[in-house]
Image (cartoon, rainbow, N blue to C red):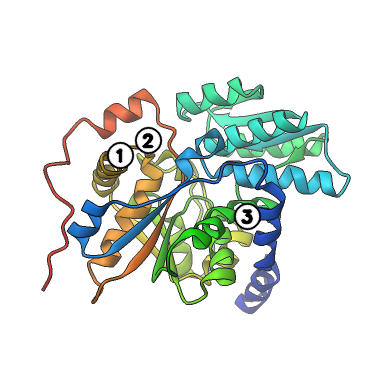
Amino acid sequence: MFKTKDDYKTKLKELLLKPELVKSAYDRIKGSINETPLMSSTQLNRWLGHEVFFKMECFQKVGAFKARGAMNTLLTLKDNNFLPKEVVTFSSGNHAQAVAWAAGKMGVKANILMSQHASPIKIQATKAYGANIVLCKSRKEAEETAYSYAENGAYLIPPYDHESVIAGQGTACYEALQEIPKNPNAIFVPVGGGGFLSGSYLAKKLLSSSSKIFGAEPEQANDAARSIEQGSIVKFDDSPETIADGVQTLSVSDRTFAHILHTDGIITASEDEIIYWTQWLTHLLKASIEPSCALAMASAFKWLKEQRGRKTILVMISGGNISAKKHHDIWSKDCLEDLPIIQKN
């Protein structure tokens, strides 16, 4: 515990990473990951009156940006002659797959602690990568059990609270900013534990310092937004209920919160808005879109409606792993009759 708020602020400043770590991570992992495409929709741009680019991490290894952080962590350890024989992590799914995949590539045993309520397709895929899966009653139990594995010698690769994980995850935005025709006015990134947003913030500091950057969070899982408002981290006791299962973390960490405080804020979206944009992005981009990344577009749409003049934005599409049940829930009603048009004054 800290005696004063100033003590806490001092600690957060000490946790800020150097943006150059993202470039180093990109150079380190680029031969091991996919260079994912930057896409846009002419029809959507016409309806919105703005130019929107999507960084399609649904085409990444394991179907999500998480592969970047996991691989950067293991390659960094290898570069430092400290590659472990065994690793452990806790995750709702995409990070689990990423650690299992990266560990398999590096010849390392992977132990993955998951909530029994995690997406079935993500549990199955993690098993397929050769990991040892341990299902727990809750996200909290999974986290606590993972730390007990770490105390017994396994190297912990957390989903977001790790320097190499954050730097690796930031390479997606770094790559996108090298591809985009001009620097965007704003960048939108989904927020769970905050590693993706932290890394993206570092990337934009390197390549597009004038761009605004926003986190996107479900209204029903708005711990990051509440943390900013309160000035200290707000935590859930159990995974919040949201269709965006990729962001069902219990809280951000001190490390990610330090970076989040330097962004331009968090924009939240309702469950209906998340479902609406999952359907529309799937239709327009002809790709598998997780609700967690449609969340970023839902928040971007809110921001765009308040803007004057034509804006260029970058939306980070974080992944594309969806279970059959989740797919059914998303498409149980048709949202495509309601066009995503911004009315001009």
Q: How crowded is mark 3: few (under 14 residues within 10 Å), some or many (20 or more)?
A: many
Residue at figure coordinates x 27%, y 34% from the top left: 330
Q: How far apart are the two marked residues, 2 and 3, measured between alpha carbons?
A: 24 Å
Secondary structure of the residue carrying numbered label 3: helix
Q: How far apart are the two marked residues, 3 and 1, measured between alpha carbons?
A: 27 Å
Q: How far apart are the two marked residues, 1 and 2, measured between alpha carbons?
A: 6 Å
Where does the image place residue 227, in percent across and percent down from the top left?
48, 63
Q: Of the residues shown, which amino acid type is indicated by label 1?
A: Thr
Residue, disc 2? 288
Going from N to C along the chain, the mark reached first, 3 or 1, is: 3
Q: Is residue 227 left or right of residue 78?
A: left
Q: Looking at this view, is 124 or 80 the one in front?
A: 80
Residue 62 sits in quarter: top right
Q: How crowded is mark 2: few (under 14 residues within 10 Å), some or many (20 or more)?
A: some
Where does the image place residue 283, in percent across and percent down from the top left?
26, 39
Going from N to C along the chain, the mark reached first, 1 or 2, is: 1
Q: Of the residues shown, which amino acid type is indicated by label 2?
A: Ser
Taking 47 as reference, is 273 above or below it? above
State whether residue 17 appears in this view: no
Where does the image place residue 213, in percent across and percent down from the top left?
45, 67
- Label annotation for residue 166: 3
Q: Do the residues labelled 1 and 2 touch (CB within 8 Å)?
A: yes
Residue at figure coordinates x 23%, y 32% from the top left: 331
**Of discs 3 and 1, which sits in the foreground?**
1
- Label annotation for residue 282: 1
Secondary structure of the residue carrying numbered label 2: loop
Secondary structure of the residue carrying numbered label 1: helix
The N terminus - image quarter: bottom right
Taking 103 as reference, is 299 above or below it? below
Q: Of the residues shown, which amino acid type is indicated by label 3?
A: Ile
Where does the image place residue 253, in percent across and percent down from the top left?
60, 56
